[in-house]
């Protein structure tokens, strides 16, 4: 049996996708949660190489594998007959859809929640399934948000642009569903990659309305829904496109 160690940060949607992929494959693994204090950057780079500071990463039989899609590929090769993540005859279409989910959709799953929490820091408690934060808690949340805005290069202009792009991304997801690439009874790598970001978009009230149809929720559920939601109205009027 292969030895697998997965390095994660608890809020990360790509990490949730990697967890779901390993569960689908039925592979045993050690899950290492890195601290949310910035020290994970040095830890990740020490294992996965300079510049490779984001999660997830997996060490598989001593070999470091960095990023959710490469992890999907590697574990599928380890156990090809156990729930293929790239099923034939659509394997290459699944790879293309998963790449789109990683390169285009995945960053939005960081920008929008941390962007919304800038305007509604009390909702940091809500999105994890608890109560709204009090004033002291909001001070703590804002410190975290400021750090993550710098780390992920979040800006108001970027938030507004990504919100306006969501209907086009929704259309692309619809085309993948219509073509039978995602949203079928067999969950594949593209379902997990796209579903991970959909789970975040459904947890941000200002984007949730654009993905209210049950078909999007089903894809998000392949990874798992978030415990709570940042209420709609966090972003200024005019930033959010009509549903």
Image (cartoon, rainbow, N blue to C red):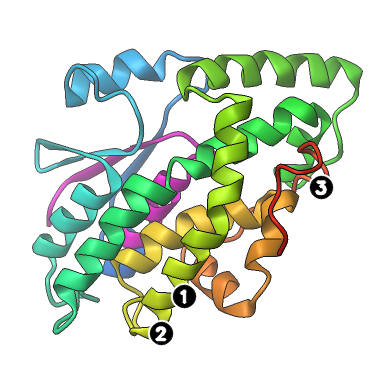
Instruction: Write the start and end of the magenta stretch as one range.
Output: 1-21
At a point 14% along the width and 77% down the height, the residue shown is 81
For label 3, the residue is 231
Quadrant, the C terminus? bottom right
Q: CA distance from mark 3 to mark 2?
A: 31 Å
Q: Tell me residue 223's x, y (percent).
A: 47, 61
Front-lying residue, 115 or 222: 115
Q: Residue at x 34, y 84 (%)?
A: 180
Q: Are marks 1 and 2 in contact (CB under 8 Å)?
A: yes
Q: Is residue 120 above or below residue 225?
A: above
Crowd band around label 2 with a 10 angstrom C-alpha radius: few (<14), some (14–19), many (20+): few
| Res 107 seen here | yes
Q: Is residue 235 magenta?
A: no
N-terminal-most mark, 1 or 3: 1
User: Quick check: 114 left or right of 80?
Assistant: right
Q: Which mark is residue 174?
A: 1
Q: CA distance from mark 1 to mark 2?
A: 6 Å
Q: Which residue is mark 2?
A: 178
Give the Cα distance between marks 1 and 3.
25 Å
Residue placed at 80% from the left, 31% from the top?
Answer: 120
For the view shown, which residue lies furthest in the front direction?
A: 238
Can residue 26 be seen here? The reply is no
Q: Is residue 148 left or right of residue 122?
A: left
Whole-percent x, y for residue 171 in the image: 48, 69
Q: Give above or below for 56 relative to 52.
A: below
């Amino acid at each position: 049996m292969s030895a697998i160690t997965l390095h994660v940060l608890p809020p990360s949607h790509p990490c949730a996708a990697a967890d779901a992929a390993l569960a689908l494959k039925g592979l045993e693994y050690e899950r290492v949660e890195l601290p949310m204090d910035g020290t994970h950057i040095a830890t990740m780079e020490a294992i996965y190489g300079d510049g490779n500071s984001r999660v997830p990463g997996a060490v598989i039989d001593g070999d470091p594998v960095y990023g959710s899609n490469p992890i999907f590929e590697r574990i599928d090769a380890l156990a090809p007959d156990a729930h293929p993540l790239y099923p034939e005859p659509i394997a290459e279409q699944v790879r293309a859809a998963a790449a789109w989910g990683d390169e285009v959709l995945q960053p939005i799953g960081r920008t929008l929640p941390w962007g919304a929490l800038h305007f509604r820091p009390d909702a940091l408690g809500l999105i994890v399934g608890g109560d709204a934060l009090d004033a002291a808690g909001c001070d703590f949340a804002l410190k975290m948000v400021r750090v993550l805005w710098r780390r992920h290069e979040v800006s108001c202009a970027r938030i507004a642009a990504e919100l306006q792009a969501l209907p086009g991304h929704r259309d692309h997801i619809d085309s993948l569903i219509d073509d039978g690439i995602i949203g079928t009874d067999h969950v594949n790598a593209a379902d997990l990659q796209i579903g991970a970001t959909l789970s975040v978009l459904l947890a941000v009230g200002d984007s949730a309305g654009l993905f209210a149809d049950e078909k999007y929720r089903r894809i998000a559920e392949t990874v798992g829904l978030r415990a709570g939601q940042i209420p709609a109205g966090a972003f200024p009027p005019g930033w959010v496109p009509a549903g």
